[in-house]
Image (cartoon, rainbow, N blue to C red):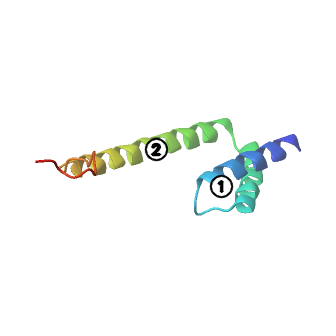
Amino acid sequence: MIGKVIGAFVGDKVAKQTTSIGGPTGAALGVLATSVIARMSIPAMVVLGAGGYAVKKYLDKQDAEKSSTNDNTPPKTSVAPATA
């Protein structure tokens, strides 16, 4: 019971950070995730965690490459008019 309450709390917090998931939906996903995790084996949890970590590193690398290609233009540091 306490695990489901904690899962709902965590799901709600995750939903607030994600634009595509609302608060009640995130809470429901948190409750669902706790029951699924309780039925998983330890090796499956390790594989799921390692896969999530690998996906996160891949997406971070893609974001870094995307932002490095956009560095050709210097950033605007001031909007003040140029003085003569």
Question: Which residue is under mark 1?
Answer: 15
Callout 2 secondary element: helix
Helix, strand or loop for disc 1: helix
The circle on residue 50 is none
- Picture coordinates of residue 40, whole percent (x, y): 70, 44
Q: Quadrant location of the N terminus?
A: top right
Indicate left or right for 4 with 45 as reference: right
Mark 2 closeness class: few <14, some 14–19, many ≥20 residues within 10 Å: few
Q: Position of residue 52 (x, y in %)?
A: 52, 44
Left or right: residue 53 versus residue 41 is left
Q: Residue at x 42, y 41 (%)?
A: 57
C-alpha distance separating marks 2 and 1: 18 Å
The kind of residue tagged 1 is: Ala
Which residue in the protein does label 2 denote? 56
Q: Give the crowd class for mark 1: few <14, some 14-19, many >=20 residues within 10 Å.
A: many
Residue drawn at (75%, 55%) of the image: 27
The amino acid marked with disc number 2 is Lys
Q: Indicate left or right for 65 with 11 as reference.
A: left
Q: Residue at x 76, y 47 (%)?
A: 9
Give the mark nearest the N terminus, 2 or 1. Answer: 1
What x and y, as percent, mark residue 84?
A: 10, 48
